[in-house]
Image (tube, helix red, strand yellow):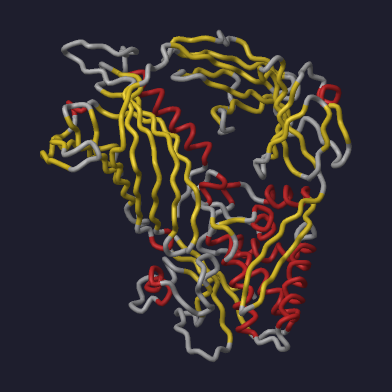
Amino acid sequence: MISMPSNIRILLIVGIVAAVCAIAAAFIMLNQNDDDARDLSGNWTKYDLDGMSGAGMESFTESGKCKISFGYHDRDGSRYQMEEAGSSIRIYTELGKKMPIPKVELYWASEFETMEKTGHETIPTVAGDKECDILRETVGAKETRTYWVHDGKTVYRMVHEISGEGKGNAVYTYTYIESGHDEIQTGCTLTTVTGSGVDVKGNKGTYATLDYAELEAEYSDDGFGGWYDAKWALISKEPKLRIMLTTDTILYAINGLGWDVEPDMGEQLNLQSVLGVDADSFIITNTDTGSTESSEGDHVFKEGGQYRIYASKDGTATKVFHAFVDNLVTREFSWEYDGGSYTLRLDIDYSDVQYAKGYYTPHERTSERPEHERDKTFVTLSYTDPHMAGYMEEIVNSLIDSYKENHSEIEAYDFLNYILVFTQNIEYRSDFDLTGYDEYWKFPLETIFDRCGDCEDTMLLFVAIAHQCRDILDLDCRLSLQLMPDHACAGVIVDTTTEYQKNPDGFIFGETTATGYDLGEIPDKVKDYFLDVEGKYYPSVCTTVEIV
């Protein structure tokens, strides 16, 4: 899988948007009734949303609701800026996992008059039968949107199709609920919040919608850390920034320190004094968990972690600070196996988590083909590196002790199946959802700390635990990483009472992510890849990486 780092994506998107906006010479910013141009700005429609994708082990169904609004009309470009906002629940049908999906997206859509008309159809809607033109819009090389439009303005149905290279196609269907109209903004405000030692020049505060703000960050010897949006996505590392405004916007300009303060856990602090800021209120956010607390000045950090501290004066945020609290963080897991209930509790020193997160760059956290030497280190370092080995030892000892409480004997297959069920019960989160990267391998300590991961993360966790248990319990087995297109699992060679199908290297399948699979059982979606009966995939596409 080829990955694109999120900062590169952001720069590409910014570059594309800037180029597109430069082409548009004039905008109709309010509702106009010119005979030669229909402007639907401010119109909105609420929809039921249903989606599905047949993307192998990541196949899903999705349902929710959203509101799509016509924004600003680019008359010369014959298009609208659209806003889609809502939420849905995605159920991964093969993995047996589900997760909430927030939807907040801005994009450009063509005027209906410029789209390809593919037909006409009367469709049933909550507002009665509606005669609709069927219009089709192609969005780049991978997306199409098909609209059922009544009277040239109301979309009663929309189908959004996204082609995925090797991952199957995703199809989203929007079904009309109701429609209305909101007056859209004719002006917007820009708020800049700065880090310690950083000031911003050029902010006028209030702008006409679609105007550009031209800003410059001035900074001290601590350096400049970059511009970030309200979601803390990096916009630019350059001190000068030119940005188009379409709504009220907040930007953060931070220093290059990394941490402004490193307070001790449990110590009561006066934030005005510690941070040297004139503020009457503070919002303190744990960036790992998302938990938020407020304070008028006195505060106690109760857990290790990274924090953002937003300082406000008279209700307006003025400064932002970053704090690093180096202390213990507790993680706890519960699952059931073979009629018994199990719990794993681990106290982690936060500095060790940061060490693991910083061990490899994001670019190095992808599969290293063809040698796979770095791939192996995500397992081996978990029990050899002094910052990680102690935690793996504690995990392994806890799992062994818990198993012995319910089992008088330890058989290799049954014990490995017990570890497999533990990893299957870890929350599924895709790399992109969690990190912003398409592929981002994590050390087992990181997965335990995050309490979630995707297929390669649980694979690495299983193999690392099983490897150490094998040595401690003298289990007769061999272990490997199994890398396939868009999926990863563990491979095991072990004596079993059931004859399971093996891959060309003799390993049986260990599904570490999807629930409900015993060791040796293969999900249908990846059976052809793993077994490679026709000899098409090994070793060029599918790979066995044994951990000896």
The single residue placed furthest to the right in the displayed view is 267
Q: Name the side, left or right, on which 499 lies relative to 160.
A: right
* Identity of the residue drawn at 35% across and 32% down: 68
| Quadrant (top left, top right, bottom left, bottom right) of the N terminus | bottom left
Give the answer, above or below, for where 220 lies relative to 94.
Answer: above
Q: Name the side, left or right, on which 17 lies relative to 272.
A: left
Determine which quarter of the picture holds residue 347. Answer: bottom right
| Quadrant (top left, top right, bottom left, bottom right) of the C terminus | bottom right
* Identity of the residue drawn at 38% across and 76% down: 532
**Residue nearer the viewer, 206 or 24:** 206
Determine which quarter of the picture holds residue 323. Answer: top right
Q: Position of residue 438 (x, y in %)?
A: 49, 49
Q: Position of residue 51 (x, y in %)?
A: 35, 50
Give the answer, above or below, for where 160 lies relative to 211.
Answer: below
The single residue placed furthest to the bottom in the displayed view is 497
* Identity of the residue drawn at 71% across and 81% down: 406
Give the answer, above or below, for where 216 lies relative to 384.
Answer: above
* Identity of the residue drawn at 27% across and 24% down: 79
